[in-house]
Amino acid sequence: MSLSDELQRMFEADRALRKAESALLRNKASSDLVALLERETQRALELEDRTEATIRLERLADLCAQVPGPRMTDALIAILDDTEPRVRVAAGEALRDVGYERYAEVARGIERALDHNADGPAMSELPWILAEIAEPSALPLIRRFLSHPNPDVVAAAIESLAQLQEPDSVSDLERFVGDPREVIIEDFEHETKTTLGELAREALDMLGYRSGDD
């Protein structure tokens, strides 16, 4: 088969995908579709073939974002908890897009995750999503992450408060200035070891405040 033929096959596959997605989402108000997406999300998360799981979860993240309702928000947070970075990027972008359009759904889904004491990769991603959307309830929600027992989650919340640039978060940050718990911060391809105290001081600097320990 020639290169031109291969390219045409790709075009045909794209057209078939768009057609199938359109047909599927015509039923977006159907409880059957919600149940199907939930079921397939769980199956994909449990697949041993991680390549296949990644393909499915990226597609499911896009589909779940287009179907309203709390169960789809919970499914997106479950996908965000996957260990594959590509999957988390897809789920994070999907949750962000849903948050811009239907913020209450995302906020309530995050509250449910916090209420259930969730502890996985998603909990270090959700504060960033809240800070990026930057709705008025972002600060009280991010504050809840500061009480999480996992220091990596707390670190994400501290950094998210720095991004949020909310002056009312100063007192929240100040209580971590002397926190010696160590965390690893990933920056593209680099990892840096620091403490929650150092992160809090950096966040306060970004907000224009200096801690009393400086």
Image (cartoon, helix red, strand yellow):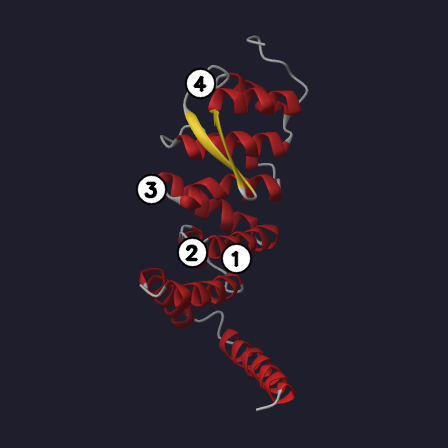
Mark sitting on residue 123: none
Mark 3 nearby-residue class (10 Å; few <14, some 14–19, many ≥20):
few
Residue at mark 1 to residue at mark 2: CA–CA distance:
9 Å
Is residue 144 something one can see in this rendering? Answer: no
**Residue annotated with mark 4:** 179
**Residue annotated with mark 1:** 90
Residue at mark 2 to residue at mark 4: CA–CA distance:
31 Å
| Residue ID at (46%, 40%) | 124
Along the line of sight, the residue nearer the viewer: 34 or 46: 46
Residue at mark 4 to residue at mark 1: CA–CA distance:
33 Å
Find out whether the residues at labels 1 and 2 contact each other: C-beta distance under 8 Å: yes
Query: Along the polypeptide, which appears first: circle 1 or circle 2?
Result: 2
| Residue ID at (37%, 32%) | 150
Query: Along the polypeptide, which appears first: circle 4 or circle 1?
Result: 1
Relative to 105, 35 lies left or right: left
**Residue annotated with mark 3:** 116
Dot 4 amino acid type:
Asp
Residue at mark 2 to residue at mark 3: CA–CA distance:
16 Å
Up-down relation of residue 73 to residue 137 (above or below): below
Give the position of the C terminus as an image quadrant.
top right
